[in-house]
Amino acid sequence: VFLEDGAQVLSAGYDRKLARWKADGELLRGVETPSPITHMVAHEGNARAVTGHDDGSVRVWHLPELELAAEYYRVHQGAVRAVALHAPSGQIASSGRDGRVYLLRPNAQPLELPRPPTDAWSLAFPPDGARLTGGGWFKLFDWDLRSAKLRVLNTAHGGIINGLHYSRDGTYVASISRQLDSSIYFLDPLTGEALQRFRPHELCGGDIRLSPEDAYLATT
């Protein structure tokens, strides 16, 4: 994750390390976490980074110091697959290999959301934070956070939806898949319909991000 208008980079790895670097590779600050990191998101304006771990825990770190701000110890029974952060509200979501999805709110106990039919491999909040979107095998998962109800939406993906990222206005979500498929779409988050299709990867897709103005799309 880029920080300081691209002058710094925040990285996380299975070696348990969370680190902040200068763009030229100089290490500014590093911490060794209690368990291998399986996923990480960060928001500089919110001054928070969120890490999911192999031990099932979710940890929140204050930026730029990388000091531990909160810990949800082993909320999952098994490794965390994905975490998501809604910066304006402070809401965090996590999904795990146990098939469970949790909403983690400040000063509240973890709230388990209705369980999807397959693991949620990716998670994303829309800009208003009223819903949570997840990606599984072939399908989108749409949780209404006011009612805690789940809808399962068909998509054009032919594999695991491994990455999701919302547009600024929340009208579409960028998606990429892996395992039998490497498609890239803009999807309607309320119907699963493919609004725009892009040239697929030759190999499995890893992650996807829109630029702040939605002018560029980056995939791995």
Image: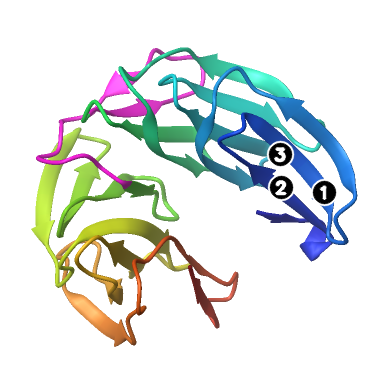
Query: What's the magenta bit mostly, secondary-structure-wise?
Result: loop
Residue 45 visible in the current orientation:
no
Query: Which image quadrant for residue 179?
Result: bottom left
Q: Position of residue 12 (x, y in %)?
A: 63, 41
The image's colour scheme reads: rainbow
Residue 161, how many percent across, how many down? 27, 58
Q: Mark 2, mark 3: which one is toward the viewer?
A: 2
Please state the extent of the stretch shown in magenta in the rendering. Answer: 100-121
The tag earlier along the polypeptide, 3 or 1, is 1
Spatial CA distance of label 2 from label 1 is 6 Å
Alpha carbon distance from label 3 to label 1? 16 Å
Counting from the top left corner in percent of width and height, residue 181 is at: 22, 69
Which residue in the structure is indicated by mark 1? 21
Q: Position of residue 82 (x, y in %)?
A: 40, 40
In the rendered view, would you say 123 is above or below 71? below
Element at badge 2?
strand
Disc 2 target residue: 10
Pointer 3 residue: 47
Answer whether labels 3 and 1 touch (C-beta < 8 Å): no
In the rendered structure, which amino acid carries the disc numbered 1? Trp
Looking at marks 2 and 1 on the same chain, the residue that comes earlier in the sequence is marked by: 2
Q: Residue at x 19, y 49 (%)?
A: 141
Question: How many labels, in total?
Answer: 3
Dots 2, 1 in contact, CB < 8 A:
yes
Give the amino acid at mark 2. Leu
Q: Alpha-carbon neighbours of circle 1 within 10 Å: few (<14), some, or many (≥20)? A: some
Q: Is residue 137 above or below residue 173?
A: above
Res. 5 image quadrant: bottom right
The reply to whether callout 2 and callout 3 are in contact (CB within 8 Å) is no
